[in-house]
Image: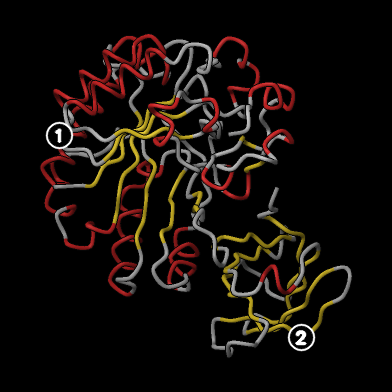
Amino acid sequence: MIRLTLPAASDAEAPYVARLNTGRGGVDEADAALVDEDAEGVTYLGRHGVLAIDGASATELDRDVVIVDPVGGRAERILRRGSGHNTLLVTERCDQLCLMCSQPPKKTHVDRFALFEQACLLAESDSLIGVSGGEPTLYKDDLLGMLERVLAERPDLEFHVLTNGQFFDDDDVARLRDERYTRVSWGIPIYAADAALHDRIVGKDGALSRLEKSMAVLARAGARIELRTVLVADNADALPRLARYVAKRLRFIEVWSIMQLENIGFARARWASLFVEHARDFGPIGDAIDYAALHGIRAQLFNFPRCTVPEPWRDLARASISDWKRRYADACAPCRERDACSGFFEWHPIQQAEDGVTPL
């Protein structure tokens, strides 16, 4: 697994952003330039003084954008060079309590929007940057302001924002119609067409009703939407009905992502009761995908190893798991489709992964 947070020591007194640079491509004001490297780590010098990072080489870190926390003694690799899986965790607060939440919410919030904005301005050309939480739109004005300022200066960038869609209202329509938002897509979860079931999965009464109001706002604004549905035992058999709901009421979405469960956060303790062995019964998933396709809705499968998906739907299984938390079972070694496969989350039960694959 790729380490995103590394031990670090810095001369600075407050957190700051820097781009790490070996000097081979030239050094500018925002860069911290390499001055030394040994077996323990690397040392840089920039406008915030000396920065020493342990546990990584200059080659690994070259051109990474980091947030340095001098008091906490760490450097976070916020934007890694060459990675398509960079995500900003803007808050750990959330208004929902999903059964399978992979990032259990906290009651406190640390405002780092200014640091994230500085980091985005240093991103590689043509980058897609993820934004996640918690629930980012709990701080909607801060979030939208950051997106707008960054996109005004960096028209080559795009953002994908994960949100539960509970906080958009009529006043947002005009703002979201701004041309800059054509470079922002919104990843919004829906777990069932039945309000009682959806609300129970997300742990919030009235959540589906409120989501429907937000979806209407986003539709009027012409927003780009990726609809997301995590597969759990509670909603597996209800997927075909959800497909009918999506085809009837949410035809304006760009894509519908059906996602296999991640064994972390709340799902870890509930794994036996939540995880669906889709390879044993793909029927409801296949029916939902087929109905969506029949009505012009593009569907895709996230976190489904390709060999576990029946051949008619296999090409819909994307290499979706972020590089820093992806691994493959030993049995995957000879598979000819490994590079196109999601593999498994680093924390997926090892024996379950080994027993569940058949190399293609």
Where in the figure is residue 58, as x and y percent of width and height?
Answer: 73, 74
First reached walking from the N terminus: tag 1 or tag 2 = 2
The one of 211 and 157 positioned closer to us in this rendering: 157
* Colouring of the image: secondary structure
**In the current view of this chain or complex, which residue is farthest to the right?**
39
Query: What SS does tag 1 mark?
Result: helix
Where in the figure is residue 352, as x and y percent of width and height?
Answer: 69, 21
Taking 354 as reference, is 175 above or below it?
A: below
Where in the figure is residue 278, as x and y percent of width and height?
Answer: 50, 17
Q: Is residue 56 left or right of residue 178?
A: right
- Picture mark count: 2
Q: Residue at x 49, y 42 (%)?
A: 320
The quarter of the displayed image where residue 79 is located: bottom right
Task: Determine crowd level at label 1: few under 14, some 14-19, many 20+ residues with C-alpha closer than 10 A.
Answer: some
Q: Residue at x 44, y 67 (%)?
A: 120
Taking 102 as reference, is 85 above or below it?
A: below
The one of 112 and 212 positioned closer to us in this rendering: 212
Task: Give residue 216's mark.
Answer: 1
Task: Give residue 54's mark.
Answer: none
Q: Residue at x 70, y 25 (%)?
A: 349
The one of 196 and 84 positioned closer to us in this rendering: 84
Q: Is residue 135 left or right of residue 17?
A: left
Q: Residue at x 28, y 71 (%)?
A: 152
Query: What SS does tag 2 mark?
Result: strand
Where in the figure is residue 25, as x and y percent of width and height?
Answer: 58, 87
* Mark 2 lies on residue: 35
The amino acid on which the numbered mark 2 sits, given as a three-letter code, is: Val
Check the picture and name the quadrant holding the C terminus. Answer: top right
Label 1 close to label 2 by CB (< 8 Å): no
The amino acid on which the numbered mark 1 sits, given as a three-letter code, is: Ala
Residues at marks 1 and 2, CA–CA distance in whole angstroms: 54 Å
Taking 168 as reference, is 235 above or below it?
A: above
